[in-house]
Structures are given as C-alpha cells and as structure tokens.
Image (cartoon, grey):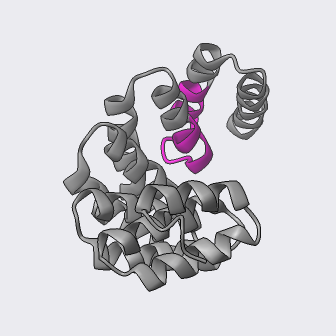
Amino acid sequence: MIAIAYWMQRGLAMALLYADWSRLALAVLNRLLVLRPSDLYAGVSRAKVLADLGQKNVAIKSLQQLLLVHPAHAASWYQLAYLLETTARHAESEPAFRSALGIKPEMDEAWYGLAMLLVREERLDEAVTALEHTTRLQPLSPHGWYQLGKTHAKLAQPEQALDVIRRLRSFEPQVATRLASEIGLSGLK
C-alpha cells in the first residue's frame, strides 16, 4: 500500500513541478519524504523547489542531510555548491564542487562553477585548469572560452588569450570581438 501511495504522490509531484506549481509540489514532496525519508528524487526536488522559492538556507540544509544518505550523488553536490555560492558561503562551496567532480569528472557545469570561484579568489592558475576542463567538455559553449581568455589576460599571457580569441572567432565571432576589446587585444590577428 505504501508503494502505491508513494508512486501516486511522485507522479503528482512531477506533474505539479512540470506545471510550475512550486508550493503545491513542495507539499507533495514533503509527503513523499514522510513515506520514504531518504528518497533521492524527493529530496533533490524539494531542495530545488525551496531554492526557487527563496528559501536557500533551508535548501542547503536539506541537501546536506540528503548527502549524508546519498554521498555519491554528484548532482546533489553540484546543487549544494551552487546554492552555497549564491549565498556567499564560498569557503563551503569549493569542497562541494570538488566532491561533485570527484564523483563525476565530466560535469562541465561543476568545472565552470569551480573556475568562477577560483577566479574570484584570484587563484588564476587553478582557474585556468578548471576552465580548460570546461572548454574540453563543452567546446562550442562561449562562456568557458570567454572566461579562459579573460583569465589568461589577467595572468599576463597574451599569446594564450589570443589563441582563445581565435578559437572563439570560429564559432562565436561577436563574443571573440567583445573579449578582444575587453582585454586590449582587439588590434591583433
């Protein structure tokens, strides 16, 4: 009987989330967690809804508790890292990003998040490494390339920055032009 109730509630939660009825979905997710306290789907979804509703600290606590039961869930580590970043808890976010990457090294969004944290902390050599992972995993996404070029410029590495601009020109010429202008390499070929 509990299994049937669980699956019915889960289906309802999914429908409510799809319809963007967050508050109703949260109530259903809470009921799911009563039926199965360590349910990964309900826990992750609940944390996302809480964050979307502006209850980021409650979402963080929820994810931390969930990760005690599911420590190998990379997406939860990433979601935790992201929420810690958005609440200016930077010292806590780096280990969460690294935990996500330790479980799932191909998670490009975690590499990018880690890179932005490292840039903010002026740990630019480490940021370059993280951005190189990002661009390797998402070679046609301009965001990683743009930040990589800016970081090379901050490190006074104009040749590497110019290589990035050339690469960007092949698929995002406007972004390449903006980057070149921002870092003072617009006259170079």
Relative to 54, is 182 above or below?
A: below
- What secondary structure do most residues of the magenta stretch adopt? helix
Residue 106 at least partly seen: no
130 to the left or right of 13: left
Residue 106 in the image: x percent, y percent?
59, 76
Q: Quadrant of the N terminus?
A: top right
Closer to the camera in the image, 88 or 32: 88
Closer to the camera in the image, 86 or 62: 86
Residue 88 at least partly seen: yes
Q: Residue at x 23, y 45 (%)?
A: 89
166 to the left or right of 63: right
Write down the region rendered in magenta. 29-45
Q: Quadrant of the C terminus?
A: bottom right
Residue 162 in the image: x percent, y percent?
52, 78
Point out the residue furthest to the front here: 187
Point out the residue furthest to the bottom here: 159
Q: Residue at x 68, y 74 (%)?
A: 139
Q: Within the magenta stretch, is there residue 35? A: yes
